[in-house]
Amino acid sequence: MRKRIISYTLLSLSILLSIYYFRTDIAAIPKKVELMVGLAAIASGISGILMSISASKVANFEAIREYFQQGDTPEMTATRQKIYEAERTGEPVDPKAAAEVCSFFHFWGMMVKKKYLPLWIFKSASGPTVVRLYYLVLPYIEERRSTNNPHYGEGFMYLVKRIEREYGYRYVPVVWGEEEEEEKKKDPLKKVVNLE
């Protein structure tokens, strides 16, 4: 027991002597620690910013992928074809098809407005299609707004106005005559959107 007390005393004395001898160096330690903490905080902030940018790009990619996957489903393709057929025949648009298209593009318009979906994806073939569909279902939208929902399809309208403003796409109604009908049967992919 005595040896233990002596060893503790010597250890304590050596610690006190080393603190006294290195007191100037020990006084500088808090400043060095503050500097290291500051550098660590800056590095942490920068890495946080980089991580949020990376997460934003991943989220944008996921939104783009989701837009194209949902837009190319057989159901959505058939719905668009019903609306194009109504344009070709001059008949009123099927209300169910119009509602589906309005709902679909209203959602994606809101995603663009809130910056979850970049507008540049509508610079390609998707942009003229959206503009064309909007003007084809516009009578349905106006009817819904006048009867029960004055804000119906606002996201869709926002999306179309942004596409028109940014990329200059315009819808020009097509009047189908007999010659155009024959040509359309030969070339079903004939452009009907004016891309001035």
Image (tube, rainbow, N blue to C red):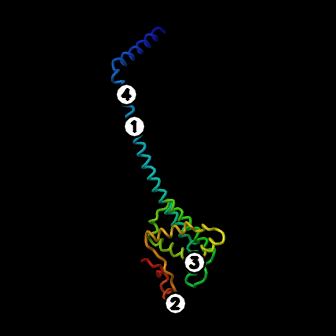
From the image, tell me which residue sits under label 3.
Answer: 83
Give the distance between the C-alpha atoms of the residues marked 1 and 3, in whole angstroms: 62 Å
**Mark before the other along the chain sequence, 1 or 4:** 4
> As shown in the figure, which amino acid type bears the numbered disc 4?
Ile
Q: Secondary structure at mark 2?
A: loop
Q: Secondary structure at mark 3?
A: helix
Question: Dividing the image into 4 quarters, which one contains the C terminus?
Answer: bottom left
Q: Nearer the viewer, residue 84 or 102?
A: 102
From the image, tell me which residue sits under label 2.
Answer: 177
> As shown in the figure, which amino acid type bears the numbered disc 2?
Gly
Displayed quadrant of residue 91: bottom right
User: Can you give x and y, in whole percent of width and height, for residue 137 in the image?
Assistant: 57, 75
From the image, tell me which residue sits under label 4.
Answer: 29
Residue 38 numbered tag: 1
Give the distance between the C-alpha atoms of the residues marked 1 and 4, in whole angstroms: 14 Å
For the residues bearing labels 1 and 3, Cβ distance under 8 angstroms: no
Q: Secondary structure at mark 4?
A: helix
Q: What residue is shown at x 49% (from left), y 88% (from top)?
A: 180
User: Can you give x and y, in whole percent of width and height, for residue 28 in the image?
Assistant: 35, 27
Q: Going by the picture, which residue comes out furthest to the top?
A: 2
Badge 4 crowding class, 10 Å Cα cut-off, few under 14, some 14 to 19, many 20 or more, is: few
On the rendered structure, is 83 left or right of 118? Answer: right
User: Can you give x and y, in whole percent of width and height, for residue 42 in the image?
Assistant: 40, 41
